Image: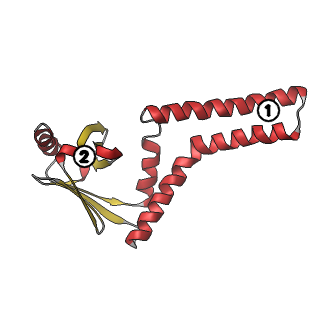
Amino acid sequence: MKNEYQITKKLIMSWAREYHLFGAANIFLFVLWCAIGLFGLLLVALMLIVGGHWLYWYCASLMILITVYKLFLARFVVWSRRYKMMASMYGVSEWIRSIEFTPEEIVLTDHTTVQRFKYESIRKIKKKGNVIMIYLDHGLALRLYEDAFITGSWAECKQLLEQNTKQ
């Protein structure tokens, strides 16, 4: 079975929106940044009522600006840098990502780079809409699209994964 799709900047930037609050650590950081932003807003409100030194205004403004950046912009900056790094490394602005499921292993081909993964390294499989995420050891994940199978289907792939991960 083989899953294949084209990597573009638009696709990679869509990944930045997908899993914003995925996992306990991301939820904790989201709450922490919200608290810092609210504290900054509270500080501004307090200074508007009673007045404040320029240093308090500076700190409150900095808290609010950093919060806005971390909550709304940082992930897009990170994913944009990842795209630029990969595009620079491959020497092209768009490339094909291919994930092949052989009886022995999973073979990921990104343009000219080939990586191989053992079925034993699979920790979890999640499906959300058309996207299938296969989580591996060491925080790695493979992204498949249900409608991007060029040979086989998701049902056949799922059966192969279940057979090879139960051993």
Q: SS at mark 1?
A: helix
Q: Quadrant of the C terminus?
A: top left
Q: Name the side, left or right, on which 158 lies relative to 88.
A: left
Q: Position of residue 77 (x, y in %)?
A: 54, 54
Q: Name the side, left or right, on which 28 lies relative to 7.
A: right
Residue at image position (35%, 45%) is: 139
Residue at image position (64%, 42%) is: 68
Residue 44, numbered circle:
1
Q: Where is residue 121 in the image (x, y as percent from the top left)?
A: 22, 45
Q: Where is residue 29 in the image (x, y as percent from the top left)?
A: 54, 35
Residue matched to label 2 = 146
Between 6 and 85, the one nearer to me in the picture: 85
Q: Is residue 87 above or below residue 47?
A: below
Q: Which of marks 2 and 1 is nearer the N terminus?
A: 1
Which label sits in the foreground, 2 or 1?
1
The crowd level at tag 2 (other Cα within 10 Å; few <14, some 14-19, many 20+) is some
- Tell me, yes or no, whether the two marked residues, 2 and 1, touch with CB atoms within 8 Å: no
Q: Position of residue 130 (x, y in %)?
A: 30, 43
Q: How is the image coloured?
A: secondary structure
Residue at image position (89%, 36%) is: 53
For residue 35, what is the image quadrant? top right
What amino acid is at disc 1?
Val
For residue 114, what is the image quadrant? bottom left
Between 96 and 57, the one nearer to me in the picture: 57
What amino acid is at disc 2?
Glu
